[in-house]
Amino acid sequence: MDHKTPDKPHAKHSPRRARDSGQANTQPSSVGNIYPLDDVVAVVDDRESAERAVRSLRDAGLAEDDVDLVDGPFVAEATRSFRQHGGRLRRVQAWLSEAFSDDAEYARIYEREAERGHYLVIAHAPRPEVVETVRQVLHAYGAHSMRHFELLTVTDLW
């Protein structure tokens, strides 16, 4: 099954692209928080399982540019950079997010997991069948805190 996305929207905001190119943090945001639109984000506790999960996602048909494995130090630095470069408007947006949505809590959960040395697997999943493929593969490798970020909706994938 081919799950490649023709316009490569994930590649434009891929954490790997920012890290490898030395670019400033290009993470998409919504109301003052990092918001990986149309992506599934999950935590895998150990590097070996996370790497195997990424290989399995690619074997399942996801394009290389649509899957990222992000380690704890990178998550911490990206989060710090995102907060520092936002200015007053981002602080107001973050406050609104804290008050009226769960986005800030999701960001804190992933940040805490990264601080524990865990890994984030991020897979672009713009269609329901891709979300289901990603969910099944990541579940097989012990992923937790797995969520799909859609426009105005975040779905827990248990």
Image (spheres, rainbow, N blue to C red):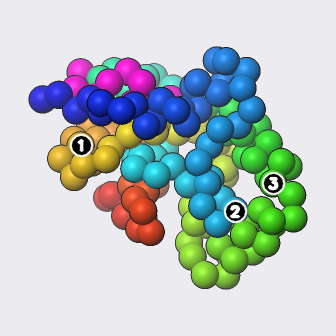
Marks 3 and 1 in Cβ contact (< 8 Å): no
Identified by mark 1, the residue type is Val
Q: Earlier in the sequence, mark 1 or mark 2?
A: 2
- Confirm whether residue 132 shows in the render: no
Q: Earlier in the sequence, mark 3 or mark 1?
A: 3
Label 1: which residue? Answer: 130
Q: Nearer the viewer, residue 31 or 100?
A: 31
Q: Nearer the viewer, residue 120 or 31?
A: 31
- Residue 16: name its quadrant: top right
Q: Residue furthest front?
A: 7
**Relative horizontal placement of residue 81, taking residue 43 as reference (left or right):** right
Badge 2 density bin: few <14, some 14–19, many ≥20, Cα 10 Å: many
Badge 3 density bin: few <14, some 14–19, many ≥20, Cα 10 Å: some
Marks 3 and 2 in Cβ contact (< 8 Å): yes
Label 2: which residue? Answer: 32
Q: Residue at x 38, y 26 (%)?
A: 54
Q: Can you give x and y, in whole percent of width and height, for residue 65 in the image?
A: 42, 24
